[in-house]
């Protein structure tokens, strides 16, 4: 399972990373595709009217690590960037997480150490 976090839109039978912007949606691909322009090397974009979009949702990946709930923000070489999603104020310190912002605690954990990896759509 790949780790996804952000907007996704269905268009013409496929699902793309997306960025809503009023009445338009920017769709992104990782390589060349018909009608998509290269935004930066390895990333292509196409702007589509909102009314052409089949669905638009926000996707988050969640998991459990050491018995606590987390949101997965990214993945790199078998490691997951996770953010604490629980309510125990002592848990972030006990787990050795970094304080990223007020009440926001993150860390890198090995992918094989997490359980219950799943996507949620909003």
Image (cartoon, grey):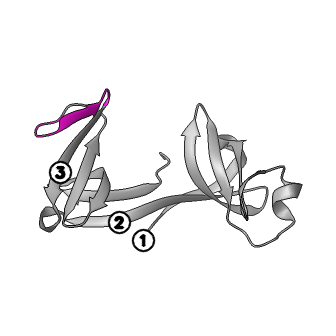
The overriding secondary structure of the stretch rendered in magenta is loop
Q: Which residue is mark 1?
A: 122
Mark before the other along the chain sequence, 3 or 2: 3
- Local packing at callout 3 (Cα closer than 10 Å; few below 14, some 14-19, many 20+) is some
Please state which of the two labelled residues, at mark 3 or mark 2, is closer to the viewer: 3
Say which of 21 and 56 sits in front. 21
The residue positioned 17% from the left and 51% from the top of the image is 47
* Circle nearer the N terminus (3, 1): 3
Up the image or down, 98 lies above or below 58; here it is: above
Residue 72 position within the rendered picture, expressed as x and y whole percent measured from the top left: 59, 53
Q: Are marks 1 and 2 in contact (CB under 8 Å)?
A: yes
C-alpha separation, residue under disc 3 versus residue under disc 2: 17 Å
Q: Is residue 114 above or below residue 39?
A: below
Determine which quarter of the picture holds residue 20: bottom left
Range drawn in magenta:
33-42
* Residue 115 placement, left or right of 6: right
Q: How many marks?
A: 3
Q: Residue 91, image x and y in percent?
A: 83, 62
| Residue 119 image point, x, y percent | 49, 60
Determine whether, in the image, residue 116 is placed left or right of residue 14. Answer: right
Residue carrying label 2: 57
**Disc 3 to disc 2: CB gap under 8 Å:** no
């Amino acid at each position: 399972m790949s780790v996804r976090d952000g907007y996704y839109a269905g268009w013409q039978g496929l699902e793309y990373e997306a960025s809503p912007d009023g009445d338009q949606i920017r769709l992104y691909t990782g390589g060349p595709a018909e009608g998509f322009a290269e935004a930066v090397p390895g990333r292509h974009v196409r702007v589509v009217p909102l009314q052409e979009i089949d669905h638009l949702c926000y996707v988050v990946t969640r998991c459990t690590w050491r018995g606590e709930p987390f949101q997965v923000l990214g993945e790199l070489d078998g490691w997951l960037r996770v953010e604490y999603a629980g309510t125990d104020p002592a848990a972030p310190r006990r787990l050795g997480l970094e304080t990223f912002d007020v009440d926001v605690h993150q860390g890198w954990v090995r992918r094989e150490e997490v359980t219950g990896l799943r996507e949620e759509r909003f």
